[in-house]
């Protein structure tokens, strides 16, 4: 089969012929319909963040497709079923899985990080981990549910505990942040969206943001947000991965507010410790999404309460994958997908 293979940082992915995965007991083979391009892929390629499996590795963790083959002991899927693969699979047996926190599983396996991912014609997965995609959700655009929508769902519902009427701040309106806006809006929050790209802010408004702020147009983003929210946001989400914007997300909160870190950075950030204590601030991390929440996200998308199709601004073939990565680096568009 054809795949885009990662051989190490600071070099383009190489599109080449590799063996088609062979399924074992409990597994299914999926013909990839689409695989989303995520900033996490850029962190391996451009910033030298190590993948858990040493290269060569097939990247890609937002995968949709159709079942092409099932192992003889698999009874819950059949050839032709339309499916969504979770970005990360959990073991089900470790301390975290047994306590309902599968998204921080000690033995988690992420597509395109621990195991080969979806920038390929085929990928294999355990049948116990995959989900049916209903007909109402377009198969190609539905791929982005696997990370760009499930991550915001977990962050908003479980980590941010956003309630109807809350003021929510989202800093960074890329693939993850725009969906944070949609999900927070769906649960009844008033959302202030921040991004340096006017087109992202326009999209945030279409997805329900009550107000937008462009850091290039105001001297102090945190102050502008405190003014828009009558004293500060109840919950803020940083969706870039920049220590400076994390500090802004924290400063823009009201007393007792909750700052949820979604963006990834290997650097440290500065927080005012006395403010955390004296004002009872909460600083919380959020990673991925638990399997138990995937059916809820799929249902929100099926019912049209969360939009999927307009979130995908471009499709690239496997041969165009490095062009697709450049498009992501350029900051243009919302989410783009590889269609092998
Ligand atoms: P993206 O590149 O699509 O989006 C980033 C957005 O931030 C862009 O719209 C850009 O214009 C904006 N931006 C950049 N600098 C800015 C600034 N100084 N002020 C305001 N806006 C600015 O990236 P993405 O795919 O949405 O990923 C965002 C982050 O989330 C990354 O760090 C990624 O690694 C992380 N991530 C985390 C999880 C998780 O489970 N926590 C899952 C997926 C991705």
Image (cartoon, rainbow, N blue to C red):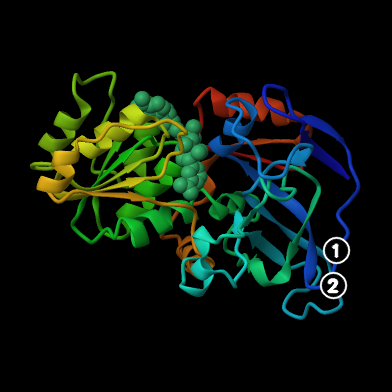
Res 229 → quadrant? top left
Picture quarter with the N terminus: top right
| SS at mark 1 in the image | loop
Q: Residues within 10 Å of mark 1 (few under 14, many from 20)?
A: some
Whether residue 230 is visible: yes
Observer-nearest residue: 314 or 231? 231
Whether residue 199 is visible: no
Question: Which numbered disc, 1 or 2, marks the residue that appears first in the sequence?
Answer: 1
Q: Position of residue 19 (x, y in %)?
A: 91, 47
Picture quarter with the C terminus: top right
Q: Cβ of disc 1 within 8 Å of ligand 1? A: no
Res 193 → quadrant? top left
Query: Which quarter is ligand 1 in?
Result: top left
Residue at numbered disc 2: 71
Residue at numbered disc 1: 23
Q: Position of residue 115 (x, y in %)?
A: 72, 50
Q: Is residue 156 left or right of residue 235?
A: right
Q: Position of residue 233 (x, y in %)?
A: 18, 45
Q: Are marks 1 and 2 in contact (CB under 8 Å)?
A: yes
Answer above or below: position of 34 versus 97: above
Look at 75% across and 42% down and name the residue there.
58
Q: Residues within 10 Å of mark 2 (few under 14, many from 20)?
A: some
| SS at mark 2 in the image | loop
Look at 43% across and 30% down and name the residue there.
267
């Amino acid at each position: 089969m054809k795949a885009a293979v990662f051989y190490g940082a600071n070099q383009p992915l190489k599109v080449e012929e590799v063996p088609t995965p062979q399924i074992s007991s409990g597994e299914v083979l999926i013909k990839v319909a689409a695989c989303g391009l995520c900033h996490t892929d850029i962190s391996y390629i451009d910033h030298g963040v190590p993948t858990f499996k040493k290269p060569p590795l097939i990247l890609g963790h937002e995968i949709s497709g159709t079942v092409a083959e099932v192992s003889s002991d698999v009874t819950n899927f059949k050839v032709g079923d339309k499916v969504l693969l979770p970005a990360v699979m959990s073991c089900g047996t470790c301390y975290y899985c047994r306590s309902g926190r599968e998204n921080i599983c000690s033995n988690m396996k992420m597509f395109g990080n621990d195991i080969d991912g979806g920038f390929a014609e085929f990928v294999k997965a355990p049948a116990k981990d995959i989900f049916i995609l209903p007909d109402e959700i377009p198969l190609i655009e539905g791929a982005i549910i696997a990370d760009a929508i499930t991550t915001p769902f977990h962050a908003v519902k479980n980590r941010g505990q956003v309630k109807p009427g809350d003021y929510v701040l989202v800093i960074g309106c890329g693939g993850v942040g725009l969906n944070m806006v949609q999900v927070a809006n769906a649960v009844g929050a008033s959302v202030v969206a921040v991004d340096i790209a006017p087109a992202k802010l326009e999209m945030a408004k279409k997805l329900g943001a009550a107000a937008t702020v462009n850091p290039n147009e105001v001297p102090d983003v945190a102050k502008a947000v405190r003014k828009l929210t009558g004293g500060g946001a109840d919950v803020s989400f940083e969706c870039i991965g920049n220590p400076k914007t994390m500090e802004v997300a924290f400063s823009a909160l009201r007393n007792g507010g909750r700052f949820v870190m979604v963006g990834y950075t290997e650097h440290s950030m500065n927080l005012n410790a006395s403010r955390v204590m004296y004002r009872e601030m909460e600083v919380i991390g959020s990673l991925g999404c638990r399997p138990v929440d995937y059916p809820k996200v799929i249902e929100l998308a099926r019912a049209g309460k969360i939009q999927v199709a307009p979130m995908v601004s471009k499709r690239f073939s496997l041969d165009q994958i490095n062009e697709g990565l450049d498009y992501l680096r350029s900051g243009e568009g919302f989410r783009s997908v590889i269609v092998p």
